[in-house]
Image (cartoon, helix red, strand yellow):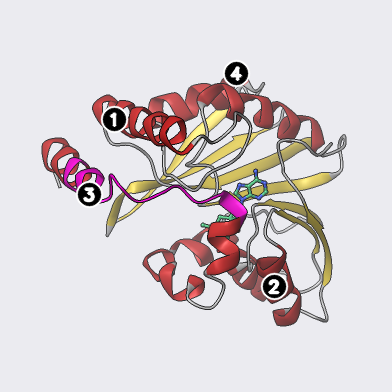
């Protein structure tokens, strides 16, 4: 799809859904617990890809926005003894994750990853999968600073999420989200489920602003040219 076609498709979708009220972030996922994993099937190859990129020495891992843990299914398949902390806003999603992996070393925290103290030098790796495409660059840079802090020296952060393929798409989505928030009277600070991905350039810059000096685009899978895998490393 060209940038022009992507912009046209987004414009048509925003027109078609302009009267649909916003849903809160947790409310959106709480209500879709039974259909959610099928909804994520377009990324079924991205999950094992993320697992394959973890270093074989990994012992402790933090998963931000873990949901029901599709990336953790793949990660536990490779590292059954891994010690994992998962954070998510949605209690039903966390309950589903716990049900799937009752025998794993899994500590779950229901809360907002922007508001929680993630600690210092605790993890060999931090991952996030399809959870950060709702937030501004400055909000993300603050979180990336926390991720940088909670990694051990030499630790890595892997992020797999979709991007806006042009500045026009980034701008349009943020403008429509702001319009809907005003219309629906959503107070500042309340998270809503409305996709506002950043361009790849802005996502990488937010990682650098968060303190990562080593940031790279690992790549894209052949069938999906708008979901990059990003890797950032804390200096050893
Ligand atoms: C699309 S789902 C992805 C879940 C999982 N990573 C996967 O790929 O299967 C996004 C998840 O991020 C969570 N989330 C969004 N914003 C969050 C926040 N500020 N703090 C914690 N969790 C958040 C949602 O509750 C939801 O479970």
Asked if marks 2 and 4 touch (Cβ < 8 Å), the reply is: no
Measured Cα–Cα span from mark 3 to mark 4: 32 Å
Res 66 quadrant in image: bottom right
Residue occupying the point 65% across, 66% down: 72
Mark closer to the chain start, 3 or 4: 3
Mark closer to the chain start, 1 or 2: 2
**Which dot, 2 or 3, sits closer to the camera?**
3
Residue 209: give its label: 4
Residue 13: give its label: 3
Which residue range is magenta in the image?
A: 11-26
Mark closer to the chain start, 3 or 1: 3
Counting from the top left corner in percent of width and height, residue 112 is at: 72, 44
Q: 10 Å neighbourhood of mark 2: few (<14), some, or many (≥20)?
A: many
**Which dot, 1 or 2, sits closer to the camera?**
1
Counting from the top left corner in percent of width and height, residue 140 is at: 59, 30
Label 4 element class:
helix
Mark closer to the chain start, 2 or 4: 2
Q: 10 Å neighbourhood of mark 1: few (<14), some, or many (≥20)?
A: some
Q: How many callouts does the rendering have?
A: 4
Measured Cα–Cα span from mark 3 to mark 1: 12 Å
Mark closer to the chain start, 2 or 3: 3
Residue occupying the point 42% across, 44% down: 195
Return the residue at label 1. Answer: 172
Measured Cα–Cα span from mark 1 to mark 4: 24 Å
């Amino acid at each position: 799809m060209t940038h022009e076609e992507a912009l046209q498709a987004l414009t048509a979708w925003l027109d078609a859904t302009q009267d649909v009220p916003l849903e809160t972030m947790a409310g959106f996922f709480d209500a879709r617990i039974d259909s959610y994993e099928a909804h994520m099937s377009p990324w079924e190859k991205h999950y094992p890809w993320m697992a394959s990129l973890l270093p074989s020495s990994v012992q402790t891992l933090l998963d931000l926005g873990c949901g029901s843990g599709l990336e953790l299914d793949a990660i536990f398949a490779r590292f059954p003894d891994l010690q994992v902390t998962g954070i998510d806003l949605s209690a039903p999603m966390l309950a589903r994750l716990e049900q799937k992996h009752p025998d794993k070393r899994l500590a779950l925290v229901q809360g907002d990853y922007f508001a929680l103290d993630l600690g210092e030098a605790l993890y060999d790796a931090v991952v996030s999968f399809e959870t950060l495409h709702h937030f501004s660059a400055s909000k993300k840079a603050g979180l990336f600073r926390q991720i940088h802090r909670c990694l051990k020296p030499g630790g890595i952060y892997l992020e797999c999420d979709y991007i806006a393929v042009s500045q026009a798409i980034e701008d349009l989505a943020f403008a429509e989200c702001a319009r809907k928030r005003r219309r629906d009277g959503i107070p500042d600070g309340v998270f809503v489920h409305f996709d506002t991905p950043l361009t790849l350039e802005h996502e990488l810059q937010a990682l650098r602003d968060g303190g990562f000096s080593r940031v790279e685009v690992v790549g894209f899978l052949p069938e999906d040219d708008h979901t990059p895998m990003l890797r950032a490393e804390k200096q050893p």
